[in-house]
Image (cartoon, rainbow, N blue to C red):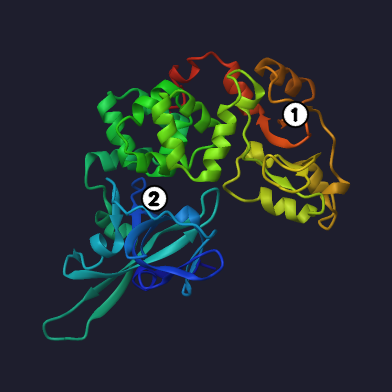
Amino acid sequence: MAAELIYAFRVMRLPLLDGGGSPIGRIEDIVIVTGRSTEAPTVLGFVVSSQRRKIFVSSTRVASLDNSGVRLKSWDVDLNPFRLRPGERLIGKDVLDQRVGDEVVSDVALGSHTGKKPGWHVAKVRLTKRGLLNPRPSYRLVDWTQVATLFAPNTPMAAEVARLRDMHASDVAGVIRALPIEQRRLLAEAMDDERLADVLEEMPEDEQLRLIEGLDMERLTNVFDEMEYDDLADLLAQMPGEQRMQVLEAMDDEDAETVRLLLSFPEGTAGALMTPDIIVMSPDATVADALARIREPEVLVSIAAQVFVAHAPHYPPTGSYLGVVHFQRLLREPPHLPLGQCVEEEHTISPMIKEREVAERLASYNQLAIAVCDSNNRLLGAITVDDVLDKALPVDWRRQPNSVVGS
């Protein structure tokens, strides 16, 4: 059965609801970006009127979209003013009421898609025609491909962003490295925050700094919000002290505290290499609860391979650490079984041991990740095998030509 469509004209009158269902604003418009020539334009987010200002809410922060409203996954919103970037379009302002021959666009139908990055895309366009002799309008619903010129990139830079949008971030980083520095920065300005964050994570720190040099503090903090903590800490460590302080002060307090912790460990140690962004659950949580967590599409594959079990609090630094339950074990156990009954006590490491010893531990015990604990057995984070591999390769490996690009 075809997925149900929801119409933009209807969405642009709905309330924005927080995680508890309380209204905190109203949808004013819908931001879309063009995909490749054969792929539908994607909903990037929503322009919202809240507290007498217009703000942007990314579609990645939306839990549901239906006729009752746009509901967020959490209770927090970014109150920075909305600004349209190159390559972005507004359905209400830029698409509705546009002429297509002797017809006019009267509405746009959105369809949902699932996968690693679930969201919404332009599916259909409603066209209206009025005749001179017949005042009653006629309507027809067409596939977006029949009016693709409505969504075509309007600048060369927007076209380049569209071309790169669905490439792997490491391949995009390779393309960007081949460009003159000014063109790199223009491309960075045109990318959405999440995409730019992904690309930065695939670049050496010195090239990251050059790429973001022209971005203002508001844009920087929005991009940094989308980065993995360990990658962000590596980037901030390369910044001049005053700039690093400004970034940390502009960040959310909890995020800044986490990054400061990572920055406190000397380079070359496990503490500087670990990520606190892992799945930690109570021993009373069930196998079914754990499987639900690792099914969340935004969780990295290396992080979803295991669930760490500890007493509250369940975010690093945790309460007393108990052990780990691997993905395969979760698949073998009954859904109602508490995690405490299937936990495995694997080796943990101190945040002060050297990177080489971390690699040796992972190799010796065939682990995909290893827990990092302090002297009080509190879980601080974990180190995954992909991060160790990154450090084991030559310093300039990211600058080497990537044979995948353009293939």
| Amino acid, disc 1 | Gln
Assign a secondary structure to mark 1: loop
Decide if residue 57 is on the left or right side of residue 104.
right
Q: Where is residue 133? Give x, y as percent.
A: 12, 86
Question: Residue most toward the left?
Answer: 132
x 27%, y 35%: residue: 186
Assign a secondary structure to mark 2: loop
Decide if residue 147 is on the left or right side of residue 23.
left
Q: Which mark is residue 63?
A: none
Decide if residue 151 is on the left or right side of residue 6.
left
Indicate whether 133 appears above or below 370.
below
Q: Which mark is residue 39?
A: 2
x 20%, y 64%: residue: 98
- Judging depth in this view, the residue of 138 and 62 nearest the camera is 62
Q: Where is residue 166? Give x, y as percent.
A: 43, 41
Which numbered disc, 2 or 1, marks the residue that appears first in the sequence? 2
Quadrant of residue 94 within the rendered picture: bottom left
Q: Where is residue 287? Give x, y as percent.
A: 79, 52
Q: Is residue 205 visible?
A: yes
Query: Counting other residues with Cα less than 10 Å from the Cα at mark 1, is it few (<14), some (14-19), or many (20 or more)?
Result: some
Decide if residue 14 is on the left or right side of residue 309.
left
x 67%, y 48%: residue: 294
Which quadrant of the rendered structure holds the N terminus? Answer: bottom right
For disc 1, the marked residue is: 367
Q: CA distance from mark 2 to mark 1?
A: 39 Å
2 vs 1, front mark = 1
x 55%, y 35%: residue: 259
Indicate whether 323 appears above or below 47.
above
Which quadrant of the rendered structure holds the C terminus? Answer: top left
